[in-house]
Amino acid sequence: MRNAFAKELTDLAKKNPKVLLLSGDMGNKLFDEFKTAAGGRFYNCGVAEANMVGVAAGFAMGGFHPVTYTITPFATVRCLEQIRVDICYHNLPVTIVGTGAGLSYAELGPTHHSCDDIGFLRMLPNISVVCPCDPVETKLALRAAIGHNGPVYLRIGKKGEPNIHAAEPDFRIGGSITVKAGNDLCLLSVGNMMTLALAVAEKLSKENKLSARVESFHTIKPLDEALLEKLCGAYRTIAVLEEHSLIGGAGSAVSEWMEDRHITACRLLRFGTGDYFLNACGKQPYARAQYGLTVEAVAAKILKDHIA
Amino acid sequence: MAKADTKKLQSIAAELRGKIIETSCKAKVPHLGSCLSCVDILTALYWHILDIDPQNPAAETRDRFLLSKGHAAPALFQVLAMRGFFPSSELENYGKDGSLFAEHPPAHGVPGIEAATGSLGHGLSIAVGLALSSRIKHIPNKTVALMSDGECNEGSVWEAAMFAASQATGRLIAIIDYNKWQATGRSQKIMALDPFREKWKAFGWSAYETDGHDIAKLIKVLSKLPDGSGKPAAVICHTVKGKGVSFMEDNNDWHYRIPKPEEVEAAKKELGLIKP
């Protein structure tokens, strides 16, 4: 996703002289092409994220569309108050990009995990929270964010994620993309959980004759309410999968939405990270397993809890 | 600057002080000491230094002023009203439910306010972004951020200082209202700022010091900026919290205290706004 982001941003900057890139001393070599194409519009803001966000707000007030970029916890929670006041309160066109979201950088330890960013950011007025599932969606999400006249948080993974979409699907902030059709239940997959969600759907189909629809539920805010309404009418079980805390993330957002509408005919299952930091380290699949985010564990819970 | 002009600005400053104190009493708005310490700086800026047009507050080429010490909003609102950004009568609503005028500058709705501030340590970073925007667009305007000494406790101020120096934002000016107090004590004692001027120099800035209540001196220093060095400039203004009213001067109670009507009268007499 990182490389797709850098390439798309370079293309956008060539076309749009308002696009600026502010990096928190991240992306060694990743932005070489951007620097060549739009050299005067690249700012290495150093390891000083609070200032980077304030500077981005100033640029936006000055008529530009800045994109801030660094590792997710530092792009978001580290400078949360600057995002809240400088960007969201002023409702400025700034795109905040967090790379290595969720457990993407599992082996770097909990300082670099980001399982709380969706929760923190979706609380802030005016901002949209977007979690693309693959390199294709990353490009489309960035394009949409640059075209959006307000703050957008783009939560992306690392490099090497597989393409889920063979071609460019329709993409809009506040929408969702159907990746696989299904009749028995619906999986709302957030961001980089897509590979796992598809594997769960396949397992349920093969072993249990359950047909699961899979959505790339890329926008946590604003929620695709029209879709949720349809899904609640069509399915008795909806599961949200995210590499984010069960407190405050996409699952929470959907459950709030359902609760506010007194939806009882449809059961919501939530899969995400627990309320604890990981003490032992490991790669992403290991870290996911510690939180029960494996194909087997997710499928087992769905089989146990879904309404037949 | 001619002596007559200085006198005129001094009387504007006195009038502003009177209005700020009156409004504080009426609207129950605090931070009087912090407002009064920067009135002369604001007067020098808004009546002499800044290239701004109250009839066209969004002009692209305007100078940009950020009240980074947002708690002095009661002072800035009076300045903007007196300069004609909006009718003074609008400030009658100050402190009332539904008013646009809060204790800190809002993001939307008040002409002449460039940015919402109040959480300290934000204004300088925004100013750097604005100054760099102007540079990209080849607009030769000035960007000015007014900070308090207490505000310089915030680490983000020094992040912004280093970044501004690395970017050689030569048209950026940081003014510090150095009244030696913050909310609950002496600023030097709480977070050692001194040697303050040397600190800014060490961070790669041009640094100046002046009497923040001598309007002629303020104008002399500020008129020379940008100084052509290519460095951002810090102007440390030595001020007195509560300046202009004997019983408020250097008395930190007036960070939060609201004046009683009789204190407003006494203050206005001292300011020469009503005959004794």
Image (spheres, helix red, strand yellow):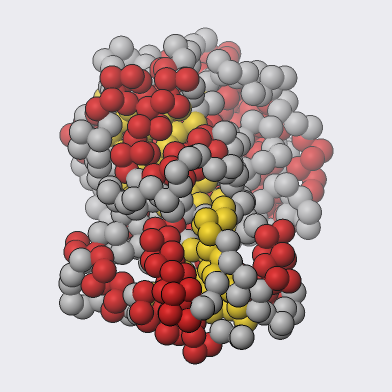
The front one of A14 and B36 is A14
Query: Which residue: 32% across, 30% down?
Result: A43
Q: How many marks?
A: 0
Q: Residue A228 in the image: state x and y as whole percent.
A: 67, 65
Which image quadrant is residue B220 in? top left
| Front position in the image: A223 or A49 | A223
Residue in the foreground of this view, choosing between A200 and B226? A200
* B190 relative to A46, above or below: below
Image vertical order of residue A242 relative to residue A157, above or below: below
Q: Describe residue A102's horizontal placement relative to residue A90 as left or right.
A: left
Left or right position of A279 against A62:
left
Against A216, residue A205 (above or below) is below
Whether residue B36 is visible here, answered yes or no, is no
Point 52% across, 46% down: residue: A152
Residue B208 relative to residue B69: left or right:
left
- What x and y, as percent, mark residue B186? 34, 56
Between A135 and A253, the one lying in front of the other is A135
Residue B19 coordinates in the image, percent (x, y): 69, 41
* Residue A222 visible to an observer of this rendering: yes
Residue at the location (58% across, 66% down)? Answer: A182
Q: Residue furthest bottom?
A: A304
Residue at image location 25% in from the left, 76% down from the top: A278
